[in-house]
Every structure is written in structure tokens, then in C-alpha cells.
Amino acid sequence: AVVSTQSGHYGRDLDQFSLEFKDEYVGLLKRRFNGRRVNANHAYQEYIADREHIHMNSTQWETLTEFVKWLGREGIVKADDTEKGWFVTYIDKDPEAIARAEKKNKMASTDEERQERFLLEQMERAKAHNTDAGPSVSTVLQRDEESEEKVVFAMPKSIGPRKLKVEPVIKNNALQVDSDKVSNHSSKPKKSGEKKRSAIEELMAENEAGKKRKKKKDSWLAENIVVKIVAKDLGKDFYKAKCVIEEVFDTYGAKVKVIKTGKKVKLDQSHLETVIPQVGRKILVLNGAYEGSKAILDKLNVDDFTVDVTIGSGVCKGRTVTDIPYEDVSKLYTND
């Protein structure tokens, strides 16, 4: 048996050291980098920063590379060798994690189907309108090169002096003037060769632009929001506890404080989920077109897993936004 001289570890055998080393290293991958590809050595350096860690020379693995290969063969991580060293991706086999991922994918699919259904309805309406109004064909003015006809502009002859009619000066409304400018601008003829887009093409372009505006990010963490811990392996002091995010780091990591006990822990966003407050409470939009906006929760759409809110800050203050997915908003933390 291999014996470690570390305090508290004396007398334990090789298998025990190896098991504890594996559990602690994999536990770090789950808490900090769950679902994300990370340099194995980077994770190891973070692991040995703990003064109570187990040295690798007390385990059955002589090198980190050997240990990473073993994790890959056991199906605990996905391991791949690159020019920058070995990288690992933790494989989460927890049924609840799998269920959450499937739920998230289903919600994304439902949102996409809703947009496509809306687009199809608009297309059908446009077709019906075009049918009622008769076929509309856009043509380009063409000139016969072989024709010798000339275009003649005739100006009317002056008949005599004309009296100018003096109209009273009336100040125009500024809004009306702007409206007239817009109208005149829109009525300008298009350049030669420029094709007029149909109503269906306009709808498709608008739908595509909307998708780009609402494109979501992988990360949703933000400081000063209330979240819930969903990692079972953290024990009863943390599992299902509501906490406030004090700091966001490395895009996907968060330092959180449990609201009831004050205990703190660093977690990956995959171990957290958003908290939906009661109607009338303040929330923060975490993703989509209104990301970063504070708002008031107006309505819960339980069947669709969405909410309706009124934006309370920024240039869109006062605007009502409907059907925002649960995972894109979270309760704002307050001391009351």
C-alpha cells in the first residue's frame, strides 16, 4: 500500500486515495465546468489550490495524462488530445439534468414552431389579399433600340400675364411636416433594375430580422438576481436553496450566497436555474431582445412556460412584452 504523509491521510491505502482523488477532481468538473470543454491541467491546478487536496503520487495514476485517459475509458468524461494538451468534458448522467436539458430543447422547439406558424399565417393572408386584388405584375420600362421615334416635350405657350394668388401663411404642424417628408420619400421611384419585393418576401425578411434580434446566448448569469441550486451532490445545505448571485466569472461561473444561511459557494450555471417571482414583482431579463432590462412581471403563462412583462428601464420603458420563456428572466434580489 502507498502511504501519504499528508495530515489526516496517514494509513489509508492506494485504492482509497485513488477513489477520493477521482471523486474530488470529477466533483470540481461538475460544479465548475459542467457541460463545457476545459483544459484538464487547468482544472487540476484549480483542484490542487485546495490545501487539503490529495497528491497524485498517492494514487494509482502516475501522471495527469494517464488519469484523464482512464476517465475517458470509464465514460466519466469525454477526453481529447490537442496541441494545447488534454481537454475534458464532464458527462452528466443525472436523470434530472437530462430532463432539464430535454425540457429546454422542447421549449426552444416550441418557440421556433410558434414563429414559423405565425409566418405561415401571414403568408396565407398575403396570398388571399393578392387574389382579391387581382394579379400584380411589376415590369421594367424598356426602350426599343431600333425605333427612330423621339420623345418630344411640348411646353404650353404663354397666354399673357397671370395674377398671382396670395394664400395666407399657415404654420404647419411639425409632426405633419415629418409625416409628409416620409410620404414623399417613400413615393420616390426606385432605381432602374431594382425589383419590388412581394408581401411574402417582406414578411420573410422581417421574420428573419426578428430571429437575429432574438438570438440567445449560451450564458445567462447576471449579478444580483435570485436563483435556485439544482445540484443534488452539494447536500441538503445547498440543494434547492434559493441564493443571490454575488459575482459572475469565466462567463459560466457564479459565486452565490444562500439567502437563508449566508453560506457561499462557486457553481457552474448548469447547477442553477432561474426563479420566477409573484406577479407584480421586479425581474431582470437575461436573454433575447430585451437582455439586461429590469421589468415588472405582469402574467404567468403556465401552459407555455412563459411570462408577460412590462419593461421598467431603458429606452423601451413602459413597453409590454409577451411570451418570454421562464429561463430568460429571474427575480431581482431585494433586502425586503
Image (cartoon, grey):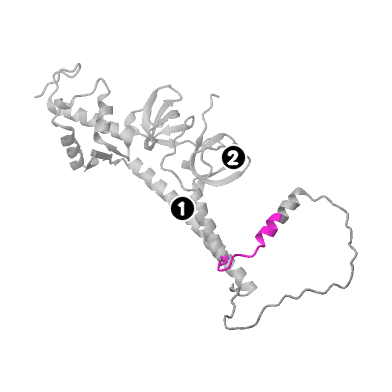
* Visible residue check, residue 50: yes
Query: Vertical placement of 183 versus 9: above or below?
Result: below
- Name the amino acid, label 1: Thr
Callout 1: helix, strand or loop? helix
Foreground residue among 166 and 153: 153
Amino acid beneath label 2 = Ile
Where 87 sits versus 143, above or below?
A: above
Q: Main secondary structure of the magenta part?
A: loop
Q: Tag count in the figure?
A: 2
Q: Is residue 241 visible?
A: no
For disc 2, the neighbor class at 10 Å (few under 14, some 14 to 19, many from 20) is: many
Residue range in magenta is 181-198
Tell which of 11 and 29 is nearer to you: 29
Residue at the (53%, 27%) spot, across then down: 334
Please tell me in which quadrant of the rendered image residue 125 appears.
bottom right
According to the image, label 1 marks what residue?
110
Determine which residue is flagged by label 2.
311
Instruction: Quadrant for the C terminus, please.
Output: top right
| Residue 172 x, y percent position in the rendering | 80, 51
Please tell me whether residue 214 belongs to the stretch shown in magenta.
no
Q: Is residue 233 above or below residue 325?
A: above
Q: Spatial distance from mark 2 to mark 1, Cα to Cα? A: 24 Å
Please name whichever residue, 106 or 287, is drawn nearer the observer in this view of the structure.
287
Tag 1 or tag 2, which sits nearer the N-term?
1
Position of 25 relative to 189 (above/below) = above
